[in-house]
Image (cartoon, rainbow, N blue to C red):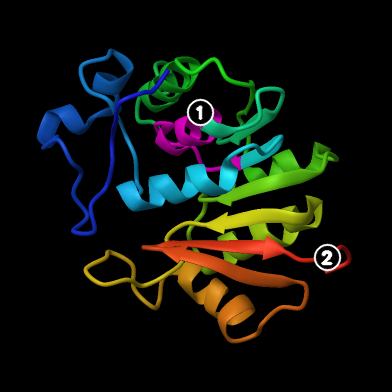
Amino acid sequence: MSTKLLLRRPDNTTDGGVRGLLRHPVFAWLGFRPVEGQHTPEEHVALKKWAAGKASLVEIGVAEGASAVALREVMAPGGCLSLIDPFHLSRMRGVNATKRAAHRAVARCPNGRVAWIEQLSTAAVKDWSRPIDFLFIDGDHSEAGVEQDWQQWHRFVVPGGIVVFHDAAVFPGGWTGPDWGPVRLVDRLFRNGELPGWRITEQVDSLVVIERLYAGS
């Protein structure tokens, strides 16, 4: 089942003309509008391309669940998608419309299994021991925050596995800048530093795809 989504354009607006009051996630939860993604249609296609057939997927930073929907639609039928987000930024903690919208959207796709981990990624990693073949880092966008996610989680990625950073590249007409945390980290580790055992395999708008080449890196 394909879920309708509102995806971001390079001009930092979303398709469908959703503005004002309707931007509140409660309207996505109640079904008055589709869930709103923070990635472009081209990034959406790239996420599905690299997640296709993967069996152990982790997403850090879920928001309304648009990218999680993309991953679940194409993952291996017997796989598990772990979604890590504390959903702590809601102004209505008792309701938490963002969490409810995400759960509603992701549940519409029956493929594979989903594990919801309502913790900060720094807490979730303490109990993690499973190999990962697809890791999407889209949580704390400070340079220190995204580096911490990288340092704590990349050791679980198997050779041939994929790590995807969002908002990690400057692109024509886009919203990112060279001072953005994910951009600075990817520049330092992969564009300028060429970290051994890892390589950039694709860049689509602000999305940067990294492949692990061998174990021990």
Residue 66 position (above or below residue 110): below
Q: Residue furthest right?
A: 216
Residue 70 part of the magenta segment: yes
Quadrant into which the C terminus falls: bottom right
Q: Position of residue 175 (x, y in %)?
A: 27, 64
Q: Which residue is mark 1?
A: 73
Q: Which residue is mark 2?
A: 214
Q: Amino acid at mark 2?
A: Tyr
- 180 relative to 154 in the view: left or right: left
SS label for mark 1:
helix
Q: Quadrant of the rendered structure where residue 28 is?
A: top left
Residue 13 position (above or below residue 75): below
Q: Position of residue 8 (x, y in %)?
A: 27, 47
Q: Position of residue 188 (x, y in %)?
A: 59, 81
Residue 195 position (above or below residue 202): below
Residue at x 40%, y 34% (from the top left corner): 66
Residue 124 part of the magenta segment: no
Residue at x 36%, y 22% (from the top left corner): 97
Q: Amino acid at mark 1?
A: Glu
State the extent of the magenta-drawn residues as a range: 59-73
